[in-house]
Image: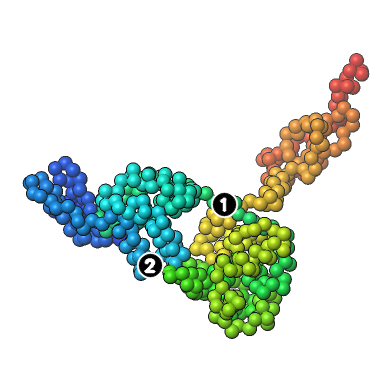
Amino acid sequence: MAVGQRQRRTWGEGTVYEFRPGAWLAQLRLDGRRLSATGPSATAARQRLAEKVEAERRAAAGAVVEPAATVPTVGEYLTAWVEGLRTGRARRPSTWRRYESVVRLHLVPFLGARRLDRLSTGDVVDLLATARAGGTSGRRQGDTSLHHLHSVLRNGIQQAVDEGLLDRNVVRLVGAPPMRHRDRVILSAAQAGRLLRAARGARLEAAIVLGVCTGMREGEILGLRAADLDLAAGCLRVRKNAGPDYDGRLALDDPRTERSRRRIDLPQVAITALRAHLEREPPATPTLFPSARGSILSGTSFLRHHFHPVLRAAGLPQMPFHDLRHSAATILQEMGVGEVTISEILGHSTPAITTRLYGRATPRLRKEAAARMDAALGAPPDRPRAGARRRPTGRLGGRLDSPPPGGPSWIPVADEPSIPGALGKQDGKQPVERQGSQGRKSKQDKDTAT
């Protein structure tokens, strides 16, 4: 059944429909009040709604309704929920660790004792205000951290709604603080070349070269193996990603998405650096760029002992390794490489993601755009000097001559053909020839004659 399509029902049964994939909503009016319940299937939603209706009728008849002893607290539910994400591998390890830290450091200390069905929008507002002031973890939280905190709580409570424990997600009723992105360091082609020269001879020179030339992610580079290289064909294949697992130990995991599994054709500078690396360090370790002990190299160690020293030697500002990904995309864009090709090199699912994350108009591209507009409209290559009088020509495509004293400073030339498509050409007719200074007396000549 399509999402949103309602099933036929009998009188008094209420309505049930799938309001999003895998989530069903059952509703019924009882004594003028609307009762609703959700579930993973239509049958589950109806059953939960029937339990609510029965409880309402018992309460209306004066029966003693036992307190909901089975309703967990916010802390109990969120702790169990985040652990379920780990066992079910519903989130990647890096995402799960962020979720777990938010639940443990912020949500449980502040909201843990609140019963789940009594969570209100006021509780959420108080949580965000307290976290901003540093009252949840002892450290003030900025807008980006508060955005993540709100997101984790919203996802956790939404799971409770999907399970039928709650009727609505009150967290959605509270606006999330906006994300604040840091200023990225985007290297120009000249700065990237300076970085590559400073990396020459370094133990992991090839890793830095790959970051500059291909825009590969840090984990993808540190997860490369010798079997992933085909230098004879001038390419490599991204098959693994290095990073901490759920328990914090370094391991090789699958790439983030299917499009992240990709073939990358290498420029000659990268092929040369990889061949020199294989000659210095034969592939006897699990990864191509291991630690000094031969194990998987952590991102922190790579930055501290390999990447940042090269940045200092090149005289470049400190930057995360991921900013090389932005720099590579910008350099390719300036070289005229299409968005689809850049998207495939970076491993994005669609070119729209590449444009949104890495598309930017550099000063060079802006100047080229202005020059192309001049060429399209037929504007002259030269411009009148500052302070000179301009005389409108009625068309584009004129040129600036050296007028005689007292003559107009902007004179169109009638014997020049107008540029096709220019604004001055109308219906194929030649523009009207105007007289120059020789065919028309200036005001100074008239005064002299008088």
* Amino acid at dot 2: Arg
Q: Which mark is residue 182?
A: 1
Q: Is residue 359 left or right of residue 111?
A: right
Q: From the viewer's perspective, is residue 356 above or below residue 374?
A: below
Q: Is residue 29 left or right of residue 428?
A: left
Name the quadrant of the N terminus. Answer: bottom left
Q: Which mark is residue 214?
A: none
Q: Is residue 238 left or right of residue 199?
A: left
Q: Count residues near mark 2 (Cα–Cα under 10 Å), then give few for <14, some for 14-19, many for 20+.
A: some
Relative image position of residue 60 (x, y in whole percent)? 10, 45
Relative image position of residue 359 (x, y in whole percent)? 59, 54
Helix, strand or loop at mark 1: loop
Q: From the viewer's perspective, is residue 217 above or below residue 7?
A: below
- The residue at the point 52 percent across, 49 percent down is 180
Q: Which residue carries the number 2 mark?
A: 86
> For this rendering, which residue is in front, 37 or 336?
37
- The residue at the point 34 percent across, 51 percent down is 111
